[in-house]
Image (spheres, helix red, strand yellow):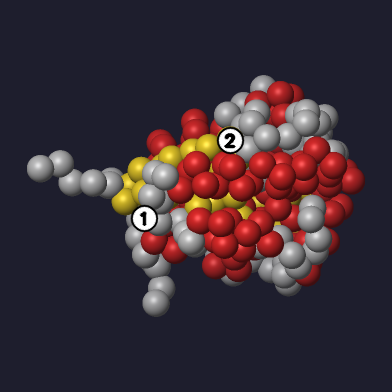
Amino acid sequence: MVEQPRRFGVLFPPGNVAMERELPCVLPPGVAMHCNRLSRPDSSLSAESLLAMEASVDRAARDLAQTYPEVIVYGCTSGSFLGGIGDEDAIARKIESLTGIPAVTTATAVWQALKAVDARLIYMITPYPDEINRHEALFLDHHGIEVAGWDSFPCRTSEEIRRITSDEVAELTLRHRDDIARCDAVFISCTQLLSVDRIAYLESELDKPVVSSNQASLWAALRRMGIDSPGLGAGRLLDLPVKG
């Protein structure tokens, strides 16, 4: 008899191709990820377009629930913190009420992950325009995490983000060694931005924890499932033991 895997679900923007590419490569044995796409009017990196995805949550969450995941991740960083400072988990509460399945947003996963690695002062790498970067810094500050500085590519659409390689993300990060040396950690934002395969390398080069949106999303799901994940090769965060 074939043993059934433990399952978690992910909802993400229609143009996101990074979560399906990165996360299956670092899943613990016996854990499966199931996905569904949200809807939005266009792929622009604007608050209006990103927040419009919430209108499709009902259909997407109910469909994904038919895979019987233990937890559902709303996999969009900016799309979950732009709705209001301190209210980034509202979409998760909506998903839970619709499906009866525990849920978490990437934005919540990020600040919880940064606190888990004892980060209070961070350097941030993003693909966003500065309007969104400023909003993200305010969101993190609300949770007691100061953004000492940031750099971005920056992009105007989801399609532009998908063309950025993880090597380019690592190169941009390492340009800021001196600034990062004064910080507790690096945060690489956006679930569409590839970086998971470079996190261990960056941590070795910088001697700092590196947290990414996708890595934090996986960590949050596994944590809520009570699954330890040492030795996955995707950073110090995933090596932390599940507590409680």
Q: Visible in this render: residue 91?
A: yes
Taking depth in this image into account, of 220 and 238 the one nearest to the observer is: 220
Q: Quadrant of the N terminus?
A: top left
Measuring from the top left, give residue 27's x and y in whole percent. 38, 44
Position of 115 with respect to 35 (left or right) is right
Q: Quadrant of residue 137?
A: bottom right
Pair 2/1: label in front: 2
Crowd around label 1: few <14 · some 14–19 · many ≥20 (10 Å)? many
CA distance for labels 2 and 1: 26 Å
Question: Residue at horizontal 44%, vertical 63%?
Answer: 224
Position of 97 with respect to 80 (left or right) is left
Taking depth in this image into account, of 37 and 117 the one nearest to the observer is: 37
The three-letter code of the residue at mark 2 reads: Arg
Position of 195 with respect to 82 (left or right) is left
Q: Earlier in the sequence, mark 2 or mark 1?
A: 2
Q: Quadrant of residue 17?
A: top right
According to the image, label 2 marks what residue?
Answer: 37
Crowd around label 2: few <14 · some 14–19 · many ≥20 (10 Å)? many
Q: Are marks 2 and 1 in contact (CB under 8 Å)?
A: no
The mark tally for this picture is 2
According to the image, label 1 marks what residue?
Answer: 229
Q: Quadrant of residue 147?
A: bottom right
The three-letter code of the residue at mark 1 reads: Ser
Measuring from the top left, give residue 77's x and y in whole percent. 68, 48
Mark identifier at residue 161:
none
Question: Residue at horizontal 72%, vertical 70%?
Answer: 143
Measuring from the top left, give residue 182's x and y in whole percent. 72, 60
